[in-house]
Image (cartoon, rainbow, N blue to C red):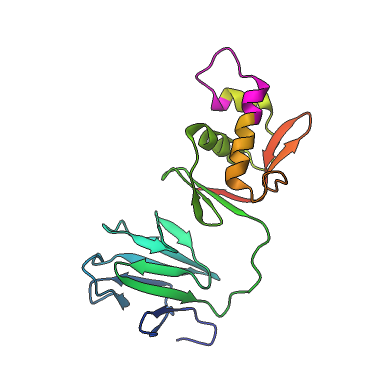
Amino acid sequence: MKNKNTPYLIDSSKHEHFLTQEITRLGRAVDNEIVIISKRASREHAHIRRDNRHIFLDDLGSTNGTYLNDERVLGSIKLRDGDKIAIGEIKFILRDPDSTSQETPFPELNVDLEAGVIRLNRRIVELSPKEFSLLVYLDKNRNKVCSKDEIGRTVWSEYQTGIFDYQIENLIRRLRTKIEEDPNTPVLLMTVRGLGYKLIGKTNIE
């Protein structure tokens, strides 16, 4: 049963699809809660899942993909009010009356090891292999100081003779240009003078 705070999808015809169940199925099959009339949709293409106050979009391994804000969804991703979902030619906008208008002031950094994907505020970030290795190591040790020696041994494990400080500093600088809004004033990847570096904030490894 819906109430005034029930989230819903609006399709291109302005029809509202209320997400009253814990799981709402989307797909071509007629037994889905939301039927997608498109040859590019799988029979059971995706789920929208409510978990307490959070809403997630789950792609079910569809052939042609589920798209959130024009980027393909790999697995599961949390939704926000105003998000745009596309399955085939069919598009929806999520409306969540219970959401707050104030966004978190801190960047959200997500490391999906299985997919090899990095997202910053849910946008995919392209990293080099060394940048990816560095970020994964820092994220596994988030909120802890990682020394240059530890970083060197982990990121350049193929080298036996050691790594120069300038190589680590250059890699840190390159990574900051990818994950910081202002690399000169970092809020995620911090320098701890005389000790090393640490990654802080809302960071998650999947």
Seen from this angle, which residue lies furthest left?
Answer: 39
Residue 14 percent location from the top left of the image: 39, 85
Q: For the point 44% across and 42% down, which residue is it?
A: 116
- Snapshot quadrant of residue 197: top right
Seen from this angle, which residue lies furthest top?
Answer: 161
Residue 26 percent location from the top left of the image: 32, 71
Q: For the point 39% across and 54% down, which residue is it?
A: 74
Q: For the point 54% across and 38% down, which residue is it?
A: 136
In the displayed structure, does residue 169 sit left or right of residue 51?
Answer: right
Choose between 145 and 182: the one closer to the eye: 182
Residue 77 percent location from the top left of the image: 46, 59
Please tell me whether residue 40 is drawn above or below residue 182 in the rendered image. Answer: below
The magenta region covers 154-169
Choose between 42 and 129: the one closer to the eye: 129
Please tell me whether residue 97 is drawn above or below residue 181 in the rendered image. Answer: below
The image quadrant where one finds the N terminus is bottom left
Choose between 28 and 132: the one closer to the eye: 132
Residue 84 percent location from the top left of the image: 44, 69
Q: Is residue 92 magenta?
A: no
In the displayed structure, does residue 125 sit left or right of residue 182?
Answer: left
Seen from this angle, which residue lies furthest right?
Answer: 193
